[in-house]
Amino acid sequence: MKTEITIDSYRDIAPKGTIDLIYNLVNRLKGRSLLHVNSTKLGGGVAEMLLRLVPLFNNLGIQTRWEIIQGTPLFYQTTKSFHNALQGQPQIITDEMFNEYKKVNQKNARNISFDSDVAIIHDPQPAAFIYKKPKKAKWLWRCHIDVSRPNRKVWNFLREYVARYDGAIFSLPSFAQKLAIPQFLVYPSIDPLSDKNKELPRAQINSVLDKYAIPRDKPIILQVSRFDRFKDPLGVIKAYELVKKHNECCLVLAGGGATDDPEGLQVLNEVKEAAGNDKDIFVLDLPPDANLEINAFQRAATIILQKSVKEGFGLTVAEGMWKGKPVIGGAVGGINVQIVYGRTGYTVNSIEGCAYRIRYLLNNPLALNELGENAKEYIRRNFLITRHLCDYLALMIKMLNI
Ligand code: UDP
């Protein structure tokens, strides 16, 4: 039988004092309720965090529901285009697409109960629900994407909705917008007790490697990501090819789709083509619940990459660092707040830079180990779910003015 994870399970992991602080905050929120709304139950960082946060809120006695907006193919195509445009890519968005966005939001709003003291509405997909906000409730729009240089047309469209919220939450100060409502900074987090991050016995790690025929006798360079152009999987392959001229290693690109991301298959095919017949490149299209597998890959890896060219936060960076691995990541968005250059890993700006740092670490095992140890401690202090809970609880108190 699975033992239930309670907040006390984190006492020996979270920084000292965190659990007591959580209990103090919860005491002030007795009888209050919370609603989260997003667009997918599986795949991607938002679902990953809600899957862990929602049970913990309930466990603490704060009645918490999680609702999901159900879209049409055109709706998901539209919101993916919004996502791309908000992260600065040129996109063509037609009136029909804007209308579909409104229509799906209106239709879903009829079937969801919005009865709760506080609601956190995640990302653009359900942002238009704001028109359903009950008078006494406090609603926060939680933005997980890099909106530092958004496409104006899409942001202006979305802004109409966002401006009606009681507050907005961003993952980095540089994502804050010109808005008349209060804006808050909350960093995302990982759960050290989830299947994705918990300790695994060596035998289990080995059996996962064997299952995917990944060699155990050479260094593994790993990137875990949805197959998305912002994650630059093709750049990862090019960096690996530069490394491979000098160092023996293999590359694992482990990914999968999210139900609200219609572009994944196309990118996966491009990645497979770029990998060609190289026997040391493993392109793995995993089911969305392959948490133990991803955990095992991260623990087996020598170096973890997250070579994104845009990134809201990049949970995979924290996941890799938590496993005591140095992470080499694109110098963008939330990757910059997780990787302390030269202390916990390296941020890079090019394929060549990425290859250079991979080679540097492969050739310097002492530096590799030291960075990995620092990385784990850095995540423990800053990016665990317990800190995230504190932030959300404090925000609820602030919004309810209690
Ligand atoms: N992930 C997964 N399977 C995959 C690809 C990603 O479980 O095939 C997980 C990954 O481990 C991480 C999350 O999805 O927990 C991705 O979050 P991140 O912030 O890195 O990127 P996002 O997908 O939200 O842009």
Image: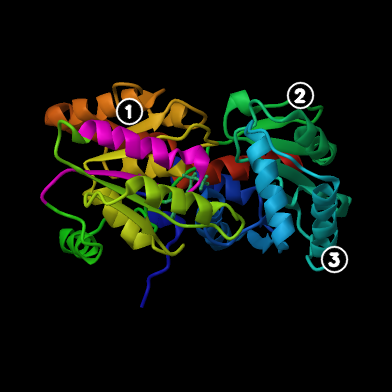
Q: Nearer the viewer, residue 119 or 176?
A: 176
Give the quarter of the image for residue 285.
bottom left
Q: Looking at the picture, which amino acid does disc 1 mark? A: Cys
If you read the primary sequence from the N terminus, does the residue marked by circle 2 or circle 1 appear first? 2
Q: Which of disc 3 and disc 2 is earlier in sequence? A: 3
Q: Tell me, for residue 110, which label it has, or none.
A: 3
Measure the alpha-carbon separation of dots 1 and 3.
49 Å
Tell me the residue that label 1 is attached to: 354
Q: Which residue is mark 2?
A: 178
In this rendering, does residue 57 appear at all?
Answer: yes
Residue in the picture at 70% in, 61% down: 73
Q: Position of residue 274 (x, y in %)?
A: 37, 45
Q: Is residue 46 toward the left or the right of residue 372 in the image? A: right
What's the coloring here?
A: rainbow
Numbered range of the magenta stretch: 217-243
The reply to whether the magenta stretch includes residue 197 is: no
Q: Secondary structure at mark 1?
A: helix
**First reached walking from the N terminus: tag 1 or tag 3:** 3
229 magenta-colored: yes
